[in-house]
Image (spheres, rainbow, N blue to C red):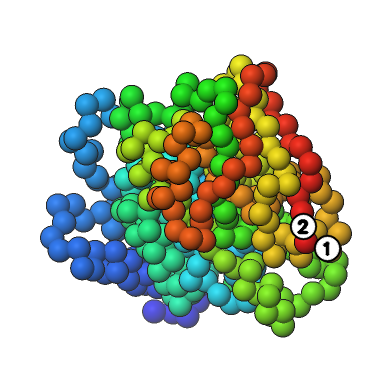
Amino acid sequence: MSKNILTYKKSGVDINAADKFVKFISNISTRKKGKKKFNNIGGFGSISNIPKNLKNPKIVACTDGVGTKIEIANSINKFNTIGIDLVAMSVNDLIVQGARPLFFLDYISINKVNLLKLKSIMRGILKGCKISNCNLVGGETAEMPGTYAKNKFDIAGFAVGIVEEKKILNGKKIKNGDLILAIPSSGLHSNGYSLVRKLIDIKKINIKKNKFLKKELIKPTKIYVKEILNLIDKNLLNGCANITGGGVADNLKRVLPNNLNAEINLLNINSLKIFHWLKSHGISDEEMLKTFNCGVGFCLIINPKNFKKVIKFFSKNYKPYIIGKICNGKKQVKLNGKINWI
């Protein structure tokens, strides 16, 4: 064949490399699972069973990415945890409505297929699926030369869950006098990284040489699936909120009924070192609260009489604690006091 003949590979797309990656995914996603009724990886679509033990099942679907946290992964050349973030960002949203995650799909777009990088990302995705008891049933990897700069990529995730209609958390169970509990976050999770990166750039900080930041900025998002589903199964939960972009106030408001307020005592929030660091480097209280979770990864709304029962479902590092209460009002979240950043 003439060297001058134009090929797809010469344009920057290596189908053979992509095929090797699909084979890798298929091998590791089916390993140790025995015989499966459906083999979805590499097909045109993914087929999954609907659980038979539900009388009136409802489907819940979510999608999300990890934002510019991928730039942190690129800068320190560490890719084995952002796959966990990717799964977490979708499944933590599913459980807010009471849904049990069934399956997950990923989408990876990249300048050029790099098998080592992609395999590392995929191992994280599989770990996230394992933690949330969710099946990876397929996805897409797109090699897009010219769209992304050298070594750049993006990832997105799609999760589908199922919930019995009578167990849907839609705000109707939330009552005046309910307690609002905070479950600690593992760190920044996957929100506010554009602001963090801007701060690092302004302060001229080399995160490769900063052990604290290098560790904190790549910490994977905590997945709350197991604990929340246990609470739902025991009818101990009236409502909940995944605290992502917008902070405690914006995300709690999304689950409140029109006739109730949430009153939060910021003094009760136990923040984490990474948020102390951000605050000490010039970010205002207002900006911190509307951009970051500030140490509150997830909120629970419960009947006060169930408090002792609820906290038994959580490990030592993620014990829920009281930060506020539900009161009569007009669907507002009132933040009282100030977080102690020290």
Q: Residues within 10 Å of mark 2 (few under 14, many from 20)?
A: some
**Proximity of marks 1 and 2: CB atoms separated by less than 8 Å:** yes
For the residue pair 34 and 117, the one nearer the viewer reads as 34
The residue located at (53%, 49%) in the rendering is 320
Q: Amino acid at mark 2?
A: Trp
> Which numbered disc covers residue 231?
none
Q: State left or right for residue 324 relative to residue 202.
A: left
The residue tagged 1 is 280
The residue located at (71%, 76%) in the rendering is 207
> Quick one: quadrant of the N terminus?
bottom left
Q: Is residue 110 above or below residue 240?
A: below
Q: Position of residue 221 (x, y in %)?
A: 53, 58
For the residue pair 154 and 73, the one nearer the viewer reads as 73
Q: Position of residue 287 (x, y in %)?
A: 79, 47
Q: Amino acid at mark 1?
A: Ser
Q: Position of residue 187 (x, y in %)?
A: 61, 60
Q: Is residue 106 above or below residue 330?
A: below
Q: First in sequence: mark 1 or mark 2?
A: 1
The residue located at (32%, 71%) in the rendering is 24
The residue tagged 2 is 341
Q: State left or right for residue 59 relative to residue 243.
A: left
Distance in Å between CA atoms under marks 1 and 2: 8 Å
Q: State left or right for residue 121 relative to residue 44.
A: right
